[in-house]
Image (tube, rainbow, N blue to C red):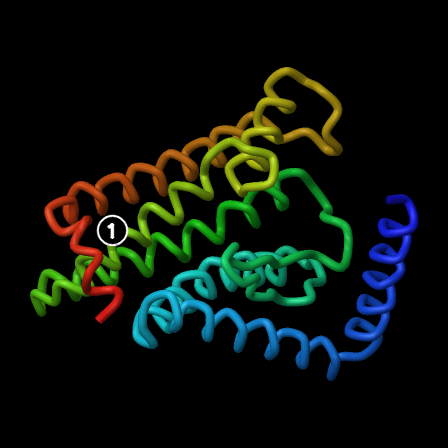
Amino acid sequence: MHWLRSHISNLFYVLYDFFFSSKERIILLKTILALITFIIYWWMFSWKTAIFMMIMIGAHELGHCYRMKRVGVGSFGFFFIPLIGGVSGSLTEYKSSYDKAIVALEGVAWGTCLAIATLITYRITGSLYLGVAAFWQAVFNIFNLIPISVLDGGRVVKIVISSIKHRYVFPLLSKPQTIKVIALYGLWLSLLVLIMICTLDVSLRLEVFIK
């Protein structure tokens, strides 16, 4: 068993060194993962739903990348992860816990805006597909707000609680920053719940995703 773990670990580092040793190889890896993700979702649902899911995931991850750039944090962009979603990450350290919290919330912010645009288009066109899509976009982003450490909500809640209890988070959020982060968390969560309520009547018409 130890032999197997050792070989898997060595393989991981070889692949990491290969793909991350140049910008071109990073782009290649992103392209491969995006194609695999598209093919899997196409096989599971339909080509139209595969595109929808990749747009939904991509908007969320682009929100993180955009905010990282605005706060001066280097980023490698984002990768699609088949059957899981996507992942974005920083190449440099955050200057403050506030920046880290805002970056975590930005993905949900972009996802919420996309869900609102989808909801409005659904109301204008009456497209059942868009109604179902708006509902599940809301579900996807609410899921990301759950206070679990690997999710955006978990990172935000950890920073806020640590600041309120004055535990060591360098640097701690100031009181105005804490209020702003909590307000933004509540705003996006409230809007997402409202979108779910507005599309609840079509939420289970999942047959549109496989046509």
Q: Residue furthest top?
A: 165
Position of residue 118 relative to residue 151, above or below, is: below
Quadrant, the C terminus: bottom left
Task: Report x, y in % for residue 137.
Answer: 32, 54
Quadrant, the N terminus: top right
Q: Residue furthest bottom?
A: 24
Tell me the quarter of the picture where residue 208 sits. Answer: bottom left
Left-right relation of 117 to 147? left
Question: Residue 192 or 99: which is nearer the viewer?
Answer: 192
**Residue at left 34%, top 52%?**
112
**Residue at left 48%, top 53%?**
107
Question: Residue 16 or 64: which is nearer the viewer?
Answer: 16
Which residue bears the numbered disc 1? 135
Left-right relation of 70 to 50? right
**For the residue labelled by badge 1, is the local secondary structure a helix, a strand or a loop?**
helix
Identify the amino acid type marked 1. Phe
Task: Report x, y in % for residue 28.
Answer: 67, 81
Q: Residue furthest front?
A: 1
Position of residue 32 relative to residue 134, above or below, is: below
Tell me the quarter of the picture where residue 164 sits. Answer: top right
